[in-house]
Image (cartoon, rainbow, N blue to C red):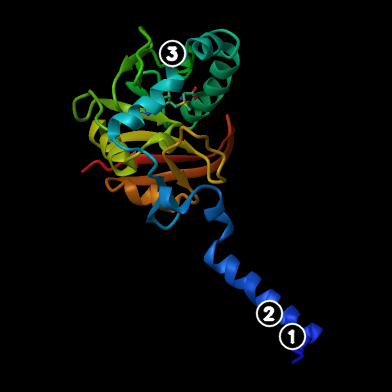
């Protein structure tokens, strides 16, 4: 007996192939291809927490692996130093010019690593400035976890950070800023909204909306585009007075 395999008309096979392709793209959108779906949790529209850590200690150790690297620390404190201090000074000088920072401000830089941003604050005249990081670097940076800042409530007039993407718990990161800021104090956050983060980032932010939502006791003062070491957006908040 002879079997005859019917040939599908060309238009019909094209239709089937395109349908298959569409089903594939709906099931696996391009954003989910960047890393395994199982390692990502959406906590809010516009922000994703990377969940690849076995424990909180594993997250801290991962951060320390880079920050404690002696070769990198050498580069950050020599070759990189002047350029980074200069760029940070430009950001802080502008904030000072528009009245959001003053020489009398008590200032904190969160995730300051070797302290270039603290040096910049002091350079433009904000003498009472300190940095916070997992690795201390006296006299510019003290040791501490930004999820539980080692400072009393209402200590600072001004807080800056370009490490929001390193927060495993963004709500704690922001909660601690709002706890340690004085009423009427200013917080400036630099973020990337275009996925330009690295393997040490703990979250990915796709719009300012979820960040603004986390600041429950503050108002947005301004949002502007910047060019800050791979970060593209500056968001300025002022903590409510009551
Ligand atoms: C991308 S680096 C930024 C360093 C610095 N702000 C700069 O622009 O040169 C991120 C920094 O955040 C620090 N960091 C990460 N997780 C932290 C945590 N839970 N508490 C405090 N610092 C943390 C790291 O140790 C590292 O120095």
Q: Classify residue 81 by image quadrant.
A: top right
Q: Nearer the viewer, mark 3 or mark 2?
A: 2
Image quadrant in which the N terminus is located: bottom right
Graded by Cα atoms within 10 Å as few (under 14), some (14 to 19) or many (20 or more), the crowding at tag 2 reads few
Q: Disc 2 vs disc 1: Cβ atoms closer than 8 Å?
A: yes
Identify the residue at horizontal 60%, vertical 16% (top origin). Answer: 83
Image quadrant in which the C terminus is located: top left
Q: Relative to the observer, which residue lies in front, 11 or 63?
A: 11
Q: Relative to the observer, which residue lies in front, 184 or 168?
A: 168
Check disc 1 and report the residue beneath it: 12
Check disc 3 and report the residue beneath it: 122
Q: Position of residue 197 (x, y in %)?
A: 53, 37
Work out whether mark 1 precedes mark 3 in sequence or the reverse, and give the earlier one. 1
Ligand 1 picture quarter: top left
Q: Which structural element holds mark 3?
A: helix
Check disc 2 and report the residue beneath it: 16
């Amino acid at each position: 007996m002879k079997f005859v395999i019917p040939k599908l008309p060309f238009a019909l096979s094209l239709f089937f192939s395109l349908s298959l392709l569409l089903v594939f793209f709906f099931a696996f959108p391009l954003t989910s291809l960047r890393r395994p779906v199982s390692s990502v949790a959406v906590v809010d529209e516009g922000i994703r927490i990377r969940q690849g850590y076995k424990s909180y200690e594993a997250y801290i150790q991962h951060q320390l692996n880079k920050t404690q690297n002696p070769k990198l620390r050498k580069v950050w404190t020599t070759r990189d130093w002047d350029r980074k201090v200069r760029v940070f000074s430009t950001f802080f000088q502008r904030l000072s010019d528009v009245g959001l920072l003053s020489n009398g401000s008590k200032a904190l830089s969160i995730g300051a690593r070797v302290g270039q941003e603290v040096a910049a604050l002091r350079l433009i005249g904000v003498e009472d400035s300190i940095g916070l990081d997992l690795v201390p670097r006296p006299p510019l940076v003290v040791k501490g976890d930004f999820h539980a800042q080692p400072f009393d409530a209402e200590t600072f007039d001004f807080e800056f950070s370009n490490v929001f993407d390193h927060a495993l718990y963004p709500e704690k990161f922001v909660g601690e800023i709002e706890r340690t800021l004085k009423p009427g104090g200013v917080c400036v956050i630099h973020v990337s909204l275009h996925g330009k983060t690295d393997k040490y980032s703990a979250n990915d932010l796709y719009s300012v909306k979820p960040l603004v939502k986390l600041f429950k006791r503050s108002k947005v003062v301004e949002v502007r585009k910047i060019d800050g070491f791979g970060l593209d957006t500056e968001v300025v908040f002022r903590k409510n007075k009551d």
